[in-house]
Amino acid sequence: MEVCSVCGRKNPIEGANFCYYCGASLREHGVEKEEFKPEAESVQAETAAAAEGTDVTRVKRPFTTLHWLGLLLLLLIPPYGWVAFLVIALISAFGANATEERRAFAKAFLIFAVIAIILVSIVIYSNPQLMDQYMEQYNKMLSEMQTGGK
């Protein structure tokens, strides 16, 4: 097993030129040769053991700041950004390839979303004037969509 000198993780692909996790060159910084020990109790050892098979897609990769930024930018896409964010949160919460941190964040987001939906529903349905305003705006939007905005 080759160990990246930048991030310290064991590279699951033998003879690779770049680290599978951080993308650093394994040839510039040098690599350390190390035998894989199945009794090691680290997450990296489990990841390397899972990756020693032929299915490299099952390796749990860390979610970087750039990934989080892209995920949050999904929320800005009207009106389907929330749907995409929700789908990704469901996949992250219950998928097999997510790290524990990503899985925990996704579950927390889903719990927060359910609580927010319940609270907004209570506020809207408990105040008939808000509900009437909402329905007027909804009907106006539907009629504009049907007439083509004329």
Image: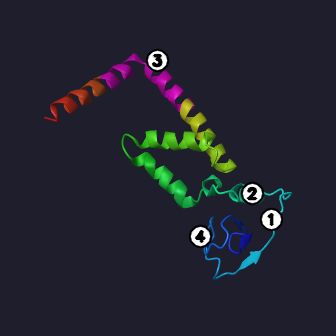
Percent of width and height locating residue 86: 50, 39
As rendered, which of 121 and 127 lies closer to the eye? 121
Q: Nearer the viewer, mark 2 or mark 3?
A: 2
Residue placed furthest toward the right: 39
User: What range of the chain is rendered magenta?
Assistant: 115-135
The vertical placement of 4 against 55, above or below, is below
Answer whether labels 4 and 3 touch (C-beta < 8 Å). no
**Quadrant occupied by the C terminus:** top left
Query: Alpha-carbon distance for marks 4 and 3?
Result: 53 Å
Q: Are marks 2 and 1 in contact (CB under 8 Å)?
A: yes
Q: Residue at x 45, y 43 (%)?
A: 84
Q: Amino acid at mark 2?
A: Ala
Q: Which mark is residue 36?
A: 1
Counting residues from the N terminus, which is met first, the one under dot 4 or under dot 2? 4
Number of callouts: 4
- For this rendering, which residue is in front, 23 or 35? 35
Q: Quadrant of residue 106?
A: top right
Identify the mark at residue 49; answer none if there is no mark: 2
Report if residue 118 lies within the magenta region.
yes
Mark 1–mark 3 Cα distance, whole angstroms, equals: 61 Å
Q: Which residue is mark 3?
A: 126
Q: Position of residue 20 (x, y in %)?
A: 62, 66
Image side of residue 89 versus residue 150, left or right? right
Is the residue 124 above or below the residue 29 in the image? above
- Give the mark nearer the N terminus: 2 vs 1: 1
Closer to the N terminus: mark 4 or mark 1? 4
According to the image, label 4 marks what residue?
Answer: 23
Name the front one of labels 1 and 3: 1
Label 4: which secondary element: loop
Q: Position of residue 133 (x, y in %)?
A: 32, 24
Q: Residues within 10 Å of mark 1 (few under 14, many from 20)?
A: few
